[in-house]
Each structure stands twice: as C-alpha cells, then as structure tokens.
Image (cartoon, rainbow, N blue to C red):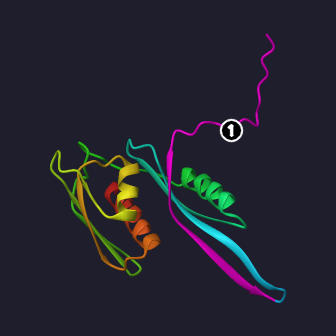
C-alpha cells in the first residue's frame, strides 16, 4: 500500500459560502476597455462564525475564489444567545441603515435578501430585521456585518 500525501489536494472547508453579488466592471484604457469581475461573498459555519469579503479578478470563478479566501480570513465570532442576538441594534453604513431586533424562540429569521444571508451563515435563527435607506446589496451586507461586530463589543 503506497499512500502519498498530495499537498495540492483541495482541503474541505468548514465554512459554507454564499455569493451575494457578482458585478462586471470595466476600466477605460488606451487600448480599449479592460473588463473584470467583482464578487461579494459571505462565509459562515452556522455556529456563530461569519466573514464577508469582496474579490476581484479577470473571470468570475477566480473572483469568487479570492473572495472566499479573504472572507475566511476576515472571520467574526458573533455572540449568538439561544439562537438570537442579545440586544436591538441600529447601524448606519454609508447610505444603508439596518435595524436588527432579537426575536422570541420560534419566531424564525425575518430578514430580506442580503441581510438574511449574513444572519443565516452566522447561525442566528430567531431575529427580525429591517433595511432602511439604501437597498444596495453590498452596503446592506457590510452594514449587517458592522452591526454584528458592534454586538461583540
């Protein structure tokens, strides 16, 4: 039995990832337009650890890979108490305003779109949230992440 260790084999990550947004962006140069992609990704283990990052690359797959790698380095431990957060919090990030309220047991995850993704991967099960102000996905993700950081303090 000859078992060899393959150092290039992809490790199975403990984190689940969710792509929130993919944008095609272009830069004007002398030779024409230079096209690249940006991917906003949320990583989490559904047990109170979550990370958010933005990856940029010439193609979509590489942008997602870069974002996942960055998000796994940018991990935040969220203080989840019995499936919810400890207190109500209202956070403003640029033009986005996110309101997070703790929910009663069994209330479920009442959140829209990008906020839901962050809270789901953070392991929060009972919460009510409201997006006020900008409906921009990336701003709302960062506002939610900032709110969870604030809870830790």
**What residue appears at the point 76 percent right and 33 percent down from the top-left corner?**
7
Q: Is residue 68 above or below residue 45?
A: below
Q: Is residue 27 magenta?
A: yes
Residue range corresponding to the magenta coloring: 1-29
Quarter occupied by the N terminus: top right
Query: Which residue is label 1 attached to?
Result: 10
> Residue 132 placed where, x, y %?
29, 76
Q: Is residue 10 left or right of residue 123?
A: right
Which residue extends farthest left?
104
**Which secondary structure, mark 1?**
loop
Q: Is residue 95 above or below residue 153?
A: below
Q: Is residue 135 above or below residue 67?
A: below
> Residue 135 placed where, x, y %?
37, 77
Q: Is residue 10 magenta?
A: yes
**What residue appears at the point 55 percent right and 55 percent down from the top-left corner?**
71
Q: Is residue 109 left or right of residue 78?
A: left
**What residue appears at the point 42 percent right and 76 percent down from the top-left corner?**
136
> Residue 146 placed where, x, y %?
40, 65
Residue 94 lies in quadrant: bottom left
């Amino acid at each position: 039995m000859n078992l060899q260790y393959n150092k290039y084999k992809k490790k199975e990550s403990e984190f689940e990832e969710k792509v929130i947004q993919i944008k095609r962006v272009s830069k004007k140069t002398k030779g024409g337009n230079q096209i690249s992609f940006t991917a906003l990704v949320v990583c989490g283990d559904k047990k109170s650890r979550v990370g958010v990052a933005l990856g940029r690359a010439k193609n979509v797959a590489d942008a997602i890979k870069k974002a996942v790698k960055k998000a796994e380095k940018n991990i935040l431990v969220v203080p989840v108490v019995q499936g919810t957060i400890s207190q109500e919090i209202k956070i403003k990030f640029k033009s986005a305003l996110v309101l997070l309220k703790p929910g009663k047991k069994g209330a479920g995850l009442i959140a829209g779109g990008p906020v839901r993704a962050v809270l789901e991967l953070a392991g929060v099960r009972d919460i009510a949230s409201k997006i006020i102000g900008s409906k921009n996905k990336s701003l709302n993700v960062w506002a939610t992440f900032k709110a969870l950081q604030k809870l830790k303090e």
